[in-house]
Image (spheres, rainbow, N blue to C red):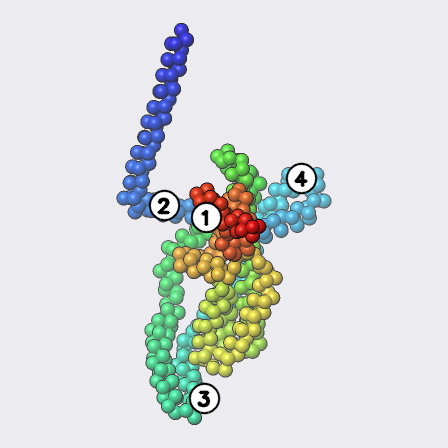
Amino acid sequence: MENQEREKEHSQKDYQKYFNIGLTAFGVIAASMLLFFCLFRLDAIFGVLKRLTVILMPFIYGIVIAYLLNPVYCWLYDGISRGLARPLNKYPNFRENASKILSSLISVLLIIAVIYTLLALLLPELYSSVMNFANNFSSNLSVAEEWIRKILDEYPDLETTVLSYYDKFSEVASDWVLDKLLPSANTMFNVVYNSLGSMFSLVYNLVIGVIVAVYLLNGKEVLLPQCRKVIYALLRHDHADALFKELTYADQMFSGFVFGTIIDALVVGTVYFIVGTVLKLPYTAMISVIVGVTNVIPFFGPYIGAVPSAIILLLTNPMACLKFVIVIVIIQQIDGNFINPKILGNTTGLSSYWVLFSILLFGGWLGPVGMLIGVPLFAVIYHIVKSRVEYLLARKGMPVESAAYAKPRKRKSREKKFFGKHKDQEANEDEQD
C-alpha cells in the first residue's frame, strides 16, 4: 500500500516536472514567434500605436493640463475652503464640492485669461515689428553700410574687404527677407484658413483636454488611491514603496524645474521689454518674446535668443545693437547670479557637464520639448542609477562617497597562497633580523 502511494506521489512529481518543462518551452516558442512578428511588422505596430495616440490625445492633453494647473488649483482650493468654512459649516460635503468646482473653474479661466492677454498684447506688436523690419530692410542695410564706411574710412584695404563680404551678405539676406519672410507674413491668414482642419482638431483636443483636466483635479482623491492599490497588488511591497519614492522625486523635480524655468523666462522677457521700451530700442516686443522664449532652454537659451536679436538690430541700427548687447549681458548676469538661483536653486543636483549632456541628448531626440524637459528627465534617471549603485556598494560594505574612489583601491595580495609569505611579511622579518 505504501509502495503504491510512493509510486503515485512520484508519478505526480514527474508529471508536474514535465508539465513545467513543456509550459516553459511553449512560452519560449511563443515569445520567439511574437518577437519575430514584431520585428517584421514594425510598421503595422507603429501605425496602431500612432492611431491609439491620436485617439487618446485629448486625455494626454488633459493629464498635462491637470499637472500644470495642480499648484494653482491647490492654492485656490485651500483659500476657498477656508472662506466657505464659516457660512457652510453645517454642510461639509456641499462645501467640499463647491470648493472643488470653483477652484477648477477659476484655475481654467485664469490660465485662459493670462494666455489671451499675452497673445492680445504681443501678437499685434510682434506682427508689426516683423512687417516693419521686412519693409525697412533695404534702408537698414544702407544705414549699416554707411556706418561701416565711417568706421573703416582710415583703412581702405580693410574697408574694401569688409564691404565685399557685406555686399554678399546683404544680397543673401535681402533675398531671404523679400522672398520668404515678407510673403510668409502676408500669407499668414491664407495659411490659417487652409489649416482650419488641423486647428479644429487642436481646439477639439484642447477643449476635451480641459474637461478631462477638471475631472482629474476634482477626482484625484479617488483616482490616486486606486492607482496605488493596483500597483501594490501587482508589485512586492518594498518594490512598490521604491517606485512611489522615485515618482515623488520625479514630481518634485519636474514641477520645480519646469515651473521655475517658465517663471524665470517670463521675468527675463518682461525685464527686457521694460528696459527696451525705456531705451526706445527697435522691435522691443519681438525681441522680448525671442529672449523670453529661448531663455526656457537651459545653457544654450540665452545665446540662441541673443545672437539673432543682435543681428537684427545690427542691420537696423548699429548703436541700438550695442545697447542691446550691453542690456542683455547685464540682464543675463543678474538672472544667472540672483534671479535664477532664487527661483530654481540647485533643483536638479546635476553638474554642468551632465546638464549639457542631457540638453544635447534629449534636444536631438525630442527637439525643443526635449531641450526643456531633458534636464529634469535626466536628473530623475541619474537619481535612480545613483541610488542603485549606492545600494549595491553598501551591500558589499564599500563606501558610497565618490571621493573615496578618487584613487584606485588597492587589493590585498593573494600571492601567499601560491608563493608562500607575503612580501611585506618578508620585509618585516628582515627588519627584525
Residue underneath mark 1: 60
**Alpha carbon separation for disc pair 4 and 2:** 45 Å
Asked if disc 4 and disc 3 are in contact, CB closer than 8 Å, the reply is no
In the image, residue 389 sits, relative to residue 29, either above or below, namely: below
User: Residue placed at 47% from the left, 75% from the top?
Assistant: 310
User: Residue placed farthest to the right in the image?
Assistant: 86
Element carrying mark 2:
helix
Asked if disc 2 and disc 1 are in contact, CB closer than 8 Å, the reply is no
Residue underneath mark 2: 49
Q: Residues within 10 Å of mark 1 (few under 14, many from 20)?
A: some
**Alpha carbon separation for disc pair 4 and 3:** 77 Å
Q: Residues within 10 Å of mark 3 (few under 14, many from 20)?
A: few
Label 2 amino acid? Leu
Instruction: Pick whichever of labels 2 and 1 is earlier in the sequence.
Output: 2
Residue underneath mark 3: 151
Q: Is residue 112 visible?
A: no
Rendered location of residue 83, percent (x, y): 69, 48
Please give left or right for residue 338 compared with residue 373 in the image: right
Q: Say which quarter of the image contains residue 225.
A: top right
User: Residue placed farthest to the front in the image?
Assistant: 433
**Alpha carbon separation for disc pair 4 and 1:** 33 Å
Instruction: Pick whichever of labels 4 and 3 is earlier in the sequence.
Output: 4
Label 1 amino acid? Ile
**Alpha carbon separation for disc pair 3 and 2:** 61 Å
User: Residue placed at 29% from the left, 40% from the top?
Assistant: 36
**Alpha carbon separation for disc pair 1 and 3:** 57 Å
Label 3 amino acid? Ile
Element carrying mark 4:
helix
The image's mark for residue 92 is 4
